[in-house]
Structure formats: structure tokens, C-alpha cells
């Protein structure tokens, strides 16, 4: 594909996209880790926090839809210049709203920009990661997502340190925003401009044609099948992030500290499998990897729900985290198999996955209010099963060497 690039340029490109995944994780977790302080500084209740999070969620959906159009118009590299700056500005502005102006509205505007920049960057960095993967001809997507996970761990750790040192949310988030901008813009210099197709007047399609290409993806049955894989796994991952600690405390009568340890075990299992996942997929193929992991996630979650004691609950959590680790990245990989439609397909798959991330936890909260948290988790077991059954859709399309199995190096 990118025969024009030297080995050194390829490695620099890969490192740049790793860095962008990492800093997006750091930026996002910097905000999330300070939510208790945000509540205190703004003097708001859980419902008002929920509204702030909803604002970020709503603008995220807008960002996903825009990402398609941005990539079609300007290409991922130029697009990310704008969206990373938007994200960083949003993070910093949220901090200013919380600490310096103590304005709920300013914080909400910041979160809106953050959600917009985050989701649009997310699609574009996944499009670039898929292109890197095709250039290297091996499964790298789980590793890219591991860097995002590592970024969230680092961001949360920094948040804990900042809170312990008594550093305000405003200074903390302003620094996080600055870090994202500097690291992001430096990294983008190593990303090759691959958008010549649209810059060359001879092959340039009209804006209407490009828009039609974006919409055509939604008529492709494979998009929905890949979406089903990602939906189940996004639910499995998102529900753990939002409800695992509560399930430990309310469902299994444990302390908050044990709840925090549970979430840590889940995150570590997930990140570890994302780091180790690529070689496994290259050996046994994308489809079998997804099938085996969906079984692991399902079994782990059932063990957690029914656990008679803590050790079994923790084994269940580790299996759940490991099993849920590759669904999202491999779904992105599968969506990007056809380089011509990669941006539109990745954006469509990401939209389905994001909707599950954003809408899943509140829906689960509403149901658990009626029937309790542990019974509610059976819904996710069902979704994981659907994800496993849909795994066949991730089969690499003809000509793609990534994720086919039987390592060829």
C-alpha cells in the first residue's frame, strides 16, 4: 500500500498514532478522575453531573457524524489538527468553568467541545491506525487501543495525585489540555498525507459523490454485523466502567475499596489482552479470536453474577475484562478492511459502538433501579452472546492480509 514510505517513516507514523491514542486517554481520564471535585466546586448534585455527561455524549454523536465528512473533505491528518485542538480546548475550558468562573454553563460548553473533539479524533485515529495496520500487514489495532487504555490509567493516576496534592481542577485540566495539544501536534508531523486522491483534480469526486459514499456504508449488511460485534463488547466494557464498582458494593455487599480494586482488575485484564492480542489474532484469525473471547467474557460475567465468594467474583471479572478486550478494536479493524471505504465504515462502526457506550450505562441504571444491579447484568450476557454469534462478519475481505490468521512472517 504505502510502498513510497521507508521503514523509518512507517515506524514514525505508527509511533505518532500510538501517541495520539495515549494522549486522548490521558485527556479524557484527567476530566473523569476529577468528577468528585467538580461536584463540590460547582455545588451540583448527581443529576446535574449526569446532564454535563449527557452534553459530552450528545456532542460526541455529532463529532462521529462530522468525522466522515472531515476525512472525505480534508483527510485524517489535516482533520486531526482541528479536532485535537478542539478536544484540548474543551478539557481546559471545563477546568476553567469548574474552578475559576465556577460557572455550570462554561463547564458545559467545555464538555461539549471535549465530546465533539474526542469522538471526531477517535474515528480519525482509528482510520489512521487501520492504515498503519494494513501497511505493516499485521494486527496492530488492539495494541493501539491498549495505548488508549494506558492513557486512561495514567490520566486517572495523575488525577489522584493532583487531588492528593490539593491542586485545583482548573490548573490540572489546563495543564492536561496543553499536554494534549503539544504532544498531538508534534505527533501529527510524522503522519503521512495520504489524501492525494481528493487533492488531484483528475480523480477528485464532487462533494455530493463523497457524501453519497459516506451514506452508502449504512446500506451494507456487513456494517450492521460488525456493529453487532462491537455493540455487545462496547456494552460489556462500558457497563464495567460505570457499574462494576456499584455491582460489587450493592450486589455483593463489599466495601467501596473492594469495588475500586474490582474495576482495577477489570482494566488490567483488558489492557493486558489488548497488548498481547495482536499476535494471537495473527495466529488464529480474527473470527476465532472473537468467538473464543466472547465465550470468555460471557462465562466471566456469569461467574461474577452468581459468585458465592470473592475469589470467584474476581476470576469472573478478569475473564470478563479479557473477553471484552478485543471486540471494539477488531471491529474497527474489520470495518477498515477496504481502504477505499475505510473512513466511512470505521465511522459507521464507531457510531454503533459509541451509542452502546453512551446509552448503555443509563439504560442499565434505569433497569437496575427496578430489578437490582446483578439481575440487570444478564442483559449484557445476552448481548455478548449476540456479539459472539456475529463474529463471522469480521472475516477479512479478499486482499486484506490483516487478521486472516496463520502468521506469515
Image: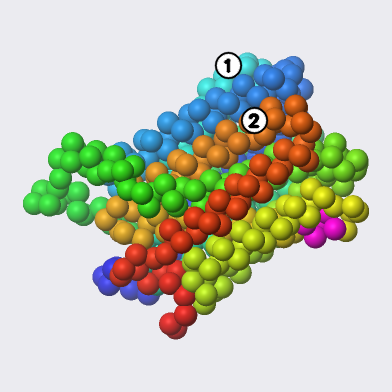
Outermost residue, bottom side? 409
The kind of secondary structure element at disc 1 is helix
Residue 370 location, quadrant: top right
Residue at left offset 67%, top offset 24%? 49
Is residue 315 shown in magenta?
yes
The answer to whether 73 is drawn above or below residue 8 in the figure is above
Residue 319 in picture, x, y percent from top left? 72, 60
Q: Looking at the rendering, which quadrant does residue 299 occupy?
A: bottom right
Magenta residues, dominant SS class: helix
Where's residue 180, x and y in %?
53, 44
Range drawn in magenta: 312-317
Mark 1 and mark 2 lie on one chain; the one further toward the N terminus is 1
Please rate how many residues cluster around mark 1, counting C-alpha atoms within 10 Å: few if below 14, some from 14 to 19, many from 20: some
x%, y% of residue 248? 83, 43
Q: Residue at x 63, y 47 (%)?
A: 382
Indicate left or right for 15 with 305 as reference: left
Q: Residue at x 40, y 44 (%)?
A: 348
Residue 329 appears in the rendering = no
Horizontally, residue 144 falls left or right of residue 252, namely left
- Mark 1 to mark 2: distance in Å? 23 Å
- The image's mark for residue 362 is 2
Residue 400 % position (x, y): 35, 68
How are the colours assigned in the image? rainbow
Element assignment for label 2: helix
Quadrant in the picture for the C terminus: bottom left
Tell me the residue at 27%/56% (across/down).
340
- Crowding at mark 2 (Cα within 10 Å: few <14, some 14-19, many 20+): some
**Quadrant of the drawing holding the N terminus:** bottom left
Amino acid at each position: 500500500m504505502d510502498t513510497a514510505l521507508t521503514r523509518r517513516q512507517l515506524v514514525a507514523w505508527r509511533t505518532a498514532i500510538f501517541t495520539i491514542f495515549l494522549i486522548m486517554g490521558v485527556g479524557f481520564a484527567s476530566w473523569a478522575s476529577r468528577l468528585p471535585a467538580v461536584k463540590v466546586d460547582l455545588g451540583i448534585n448527581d443529576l446535574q453531573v449526569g446532564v454535563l455527561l449527557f452534553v459530552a455524549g450528545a456532542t460526541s454523536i455529532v463529532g462521529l457524524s462530522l468525522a466522515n465528512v472531515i476525512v472525505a473533505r480534508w483527510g485524517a491528518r489535516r482533520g486531526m489538527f482541528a479536532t485535537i485542538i478542539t478536544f484540548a480546548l474543551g478539557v481546559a475550558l471545563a477546568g476553567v468553568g469548574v474552578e475559576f468562573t465556577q460557572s455550570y454553563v462554561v463547564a458545559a460548553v467545555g464538555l461539549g467541545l471535549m465530546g465533539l473533539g474526542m469522538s471526531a479524533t477517535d474515528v480519525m485515529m482509528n482510520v489512521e491506525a487501520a492504515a498503519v495496520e494494513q501497511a505493516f500487514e499485521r494486527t496492530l489495532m488492539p495494541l493501539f487501543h491498549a495505548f488508549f487504555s494506558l492513557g486512561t490509567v495514567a490520566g486517572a493516576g495523575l488525577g489522584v495525585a493532583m487531588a492528593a496534592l490539593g491542586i485545583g481542577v482548573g490548573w490540572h485540566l489546563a495543564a492536561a489540555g496543553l499536554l494534549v495539544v503539544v504532544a498531538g501536534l508534534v505527533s501529527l508531523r510524522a503522519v503521512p498525507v495520504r489524501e492525494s486522491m481528493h487533492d488531484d483534480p483528475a480523480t477528485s469526486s464532487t462533494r455530493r459523490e463523497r457524501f453519497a459514499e459516506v451514506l452508502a456504508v449504512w446500506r451494507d449488511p456487513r456494517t450492521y454485523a460488525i456493529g453487532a460485534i462491537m455493540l455487545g463488547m462496547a456494552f460489556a466494557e462500558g457497563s464495567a466502567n460505570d457499574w462494576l464498582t456499584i455491582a460489587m458494593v450493592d450486589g455483593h455487599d463489599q466495601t467501596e475499596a473492594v469495588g475500586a480494586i474490582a474495576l482495577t482488575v477489570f482494566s488490567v485484564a483488558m489492557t493486558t489482552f489488548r497488548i498481547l492480542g495482536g499476535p494471537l489474532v495473527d495466529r488464529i484469525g480474527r473470527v476465532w479470536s472473537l468467538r473464543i473471547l466472547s465465550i470468555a467474557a460471557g462465562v466471566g460475567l456469569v461467574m461474577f453474577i452468581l459468585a458465592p465468594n470473592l475469589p470467584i467474583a474476581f476470576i469472573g471479572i478478569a475473564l470478563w475484562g479479557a473477553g471484552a478486550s478485543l471486540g471494539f478494536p477488531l471491529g474497527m479493524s474489520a470495518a477498515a478492511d477496504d481502504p477505499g471505504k475505510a473512513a466511512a465504515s470505521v465511522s459507521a462502526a464507531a457510531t454503533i459502538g459509541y451509542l452502546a457506550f453512551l446509552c448503555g450505562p443509563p439504560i442499565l441504571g434505569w433497569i437496575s433501579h427496578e430489578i437490582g444491579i446483578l439481575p440487570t447484568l444478564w442483559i449484557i450476557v445476552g448481548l455478548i452472546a449476540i456479539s459472539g454469534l456475529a463474529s463471522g462478519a469480521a472475516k477479512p475481505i479478499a486482499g486484506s492480509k490483516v487478521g486472516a490468521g496463520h502468521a506469515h512472517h
